[in-house]
Image (cartoon, grey):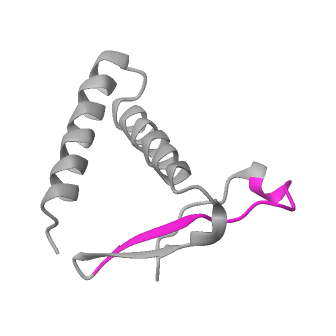
Amino acid sequence: MTKGLPIPTAVNNDNNAIELLRVWAANGKQHIVIEPSAWDDPAAWGIMLADLAKHISQALCRNDEQQARIVLARIKEGLLVELENPTE
């Protein structure tokens, strides 16, 4: 049995909606499926990753903006370390 997340309601109302990314944690590893043709400019993926990091920090901190900034900085730190020295 898998534990998937719900599909946002707005997606069901948009015939042009596409899933960009699916990430699963299984067997101690990440498993990722990407729709690489979503955008022509790779910088759009960077914008999406920045937005995702902000959403994660806000979700973890539930309306505590000061703590969310601290968590976002930690996410950024982890991202930069991983980009420079990948664990795999």
Identify the residue shown where x is 25% and y is 49%. 79
Q: Is residue 87 left or right of residue 58?
A: left
Quadrant assignment, res 88 = bottom left
Is 17 included in the stretch rendered in magenta? yes
Query: Between residues 61 and 19, which one lies in front from this camera angle?
Result: 19
Measured as percent of width and height from the top left, residue 82 is found at 19, 57
Number of numbered markers: 0
Q: Is residue 5 left or right of residue 46?
A: right
Q: Is residue 79 above or below residue 18?
A: above
- Which residue is most to the top? 66
Q: Is residue 20 above or below residue 27?
A: above
Identify the residue shown where x is 25% and y is 76%. 29
Is 77 included in the stretch rendered in magenta? no
Quadrant assignment, res 61 = top left
Q: Is residue 86 left or right of residue 8?
A: left
Any part of residue 35 in sight: no
Q: Which residues are magenta?
A: 11-26
Identify the residue shown where x is 31% and y is 24%. 69
- Which residue is most to the front? 41
Any part of residue 7 in sight: yes
Q: Is residue 14 left or right of residue 77?
A: right
Query: Between residues 86 and 6, which one lies in front from this camera angle?
Result: 86
Measured as percent of width and height from the top left, residue 17 is found at 76, 60
Measured as percent of width and height from the top left, residue 76 is found at 26, 40
Q: Is residue 61 above or below residue 81?
A: above
Identify the residue shown where x is 39% and y is 42%. 53
